[in-house]
Amino acid sequence: MNPTPQPKPQCIACNRTAEQIPLITLDYQNQKFSICPQHLPLLIHEPKSLIGKLPGAEAMEPAVHKD
């Protein structure tokens, strides 16, 4: 019996894989997610844009900047 191949990690925003772009792995809610450097600012500044792609994104608040 062959083991089921695991899906390749891909960016939660653009679906590119580590073969196409570097990926950052996130541990969140006992799961692993990946995001590329181009889309990391979305997680920080516009987390609600990841609703439907990252569980709980609807409850996340953007970072507050004190300039």
Image (cartoon, grey):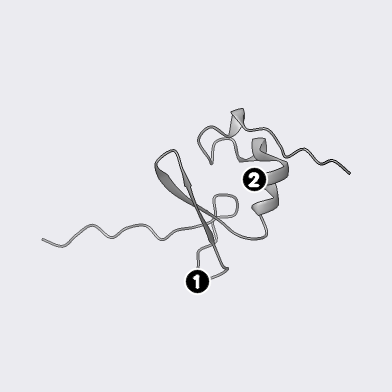
Q: Residue at x 66, y 54 (%)?
A: 39
Residue tagged by mark 1? 19
Badges 2 and 1: C-beta atoms under 8 Å apart? no
35 to the left or right of 31: right
- Horizontal and vertical percent position of residue 24: 54, 59
Image vertical order of residue 31 relative to residue 60, above or below: below
**Residue placed farthest to the front in the image?**
66
- Horizontal and vertical percent position of residue 48: 66, 35
Q: Amino acid at mark 2?
A: Leu
Residue at disc 2, secondary structure:
helix
Among the 4 quarters of the image, the one containing residue 8? bottom left
Query: Disc 2 vs disc 1: which is toward the camera?
Result: 2
Q: Which mark is first along the chain, 1 or 2?
A: 1
Residue tagged by mark 2? 43
CA distance separating discs 2 and 1: 22 Å
Residue at disc 1, secondary structure:
loop
Q: Residue at x 61, y 40 (%)?
A: 50
Q: Residue at x 39, y 41 (%)?
A: 30
Q: Amino acid at mark 1?
A: Glu
Among the 4 quarters of the image, the one containing residue 62? top right
